[in-house]
Image (cartoon, rainbow, N blue to C red):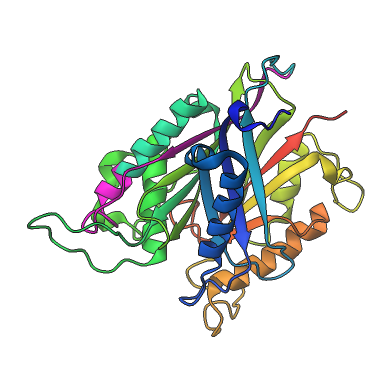
Amino acid sequence: SAFQPARIRRIAVLAKTEGNSDVNDYSREYGLLATETAIEQQGGRALVEKSTFLFSTGCEGAMTPFGILFVDVESGDEKPSPRGSALAIGCARSRSLRPEEIGTPAHADITADTVRAAMQDAGVAAADVALVIVKTPVTSRLPAAAGAVFNRRITSAHSKAVGALGAGVALGEVERSRAVQEAIDTDHSLHARRAMVFSGAEVDFVEILLLANRPGAAGSLSVHTGFLRDLLDAQALRDMFTGAGCALDAHGQVIEPARVAATLIKAGSAPDGKVRGRRTTMKSSHIDMDKHVRAAVSGIIGSILGDTRVFISANTVHQAPPGGGLAACIVRDAP
């Protein structure tokens, strides 16, 4: 079959687990273990080594815990898409970071280098890239270098900020000279435009899944992006789908949702917790702000797409202007 291990170039799994995303949430680790085990049973350790895993936790609202499986297969009879380009993926993983590097501009540089490696893996230039998905560490399992100056314990948001700046540098969207320690999670005029960044304690390296429309590539899939003004910007999502060639009905719902193979959204919340000038309880609630965002956006995209299997994440630090967000969809060609 087409999915025989010997014919697979690479595998990538992007998954949403239903954990609470608190310190006692091990759903990512369990999900990762189960996925690695399943792949190893099919193709041995060699196939696992060709796989990239990006797991994110938190499925609040009308969102189903699920995963997106990308399989890059050598078919032998590939013909370029008549559209001139088609979806291509690129994967890359950095070395393990040392504890004194995490949360610093050195961490951003490592991220930038890893994004460049993923572009090379996909065979694309920065202009072809639609989206870079970054998994970045908050802890290290390596000993510190001799004489190293330890950094303060960094937060998940700080690690995402560093990863976003690094991705922005690689894509030519952030000047490296401005990606300094003092700017991290502080100078919010700096942001990438094509990066979704996730952090976790289950990794001590940077891992990249890159989605691009590669000129001359074969296949019936393409990736398209959109930008959200705020977490209520349903029109931006509709514009993204129509720009991808998906028709909407009179109520603004996608007519052929089966053509949408995947939808990913990174939504942000304004620093003051307001939405369109109105106060909300997102920042004052005992519930983490990111959980509010994921729940709210799941209802908005669900009403447009009619599907609960949407990958939604929050916290767009250095990935969009404050309070803004970005989205992507992978769409099949019309029959």
**Image coordinates for residue 208, horizontal then vertical, percent:** 46, 42
Above or below, 314 against 191 in this view is: below
Name which residue lies at 61% across and 33% down.
5
Say left or right for 317 vs 211: left
Which of the image's four quarters has the N terminus? top right
Residue 188 appears in the picture as rendered: no
Which of the image's four quarters has the C terminus? top right
Question: What span is in magenta?
Answer: 83-109
Foreground of the two, 222 or 144 = 144
Name which residue lies at 36% across and 39% down.
112
Foreground of the two, 72 or 182 = 72
Above or below, 118 against 290 in this view is: above
**Image coordinates for residue 301, horizontal then vertical, percent:** 74, 57
Foreground of the two, 144 or 178 = 144
- Is residue 88 inside the magenta stretch? yes
Residue extending furthest toward the right = 250
Residue 251 appears in the picture as rendered: yes
Q: How many marks?
A: 0
The quarter of the displayed image where residue 6 is located: top right
Say left or right for 110 vs 303: left
Residue extending furthest toward the left = 147
The quarter of the displayed image where residue 212 is located: top right
**Image coordinates for residue 325, horizontal then vertical, percent:** 57, 54
**Image coordinates for residue 196, horizontal then vertical, percent:** 52, 49
- Is residue 323 inside the magenta stretch? no
Above or below, 199 against 172 in this view is: below
Say left or right for 53 vs 227: left
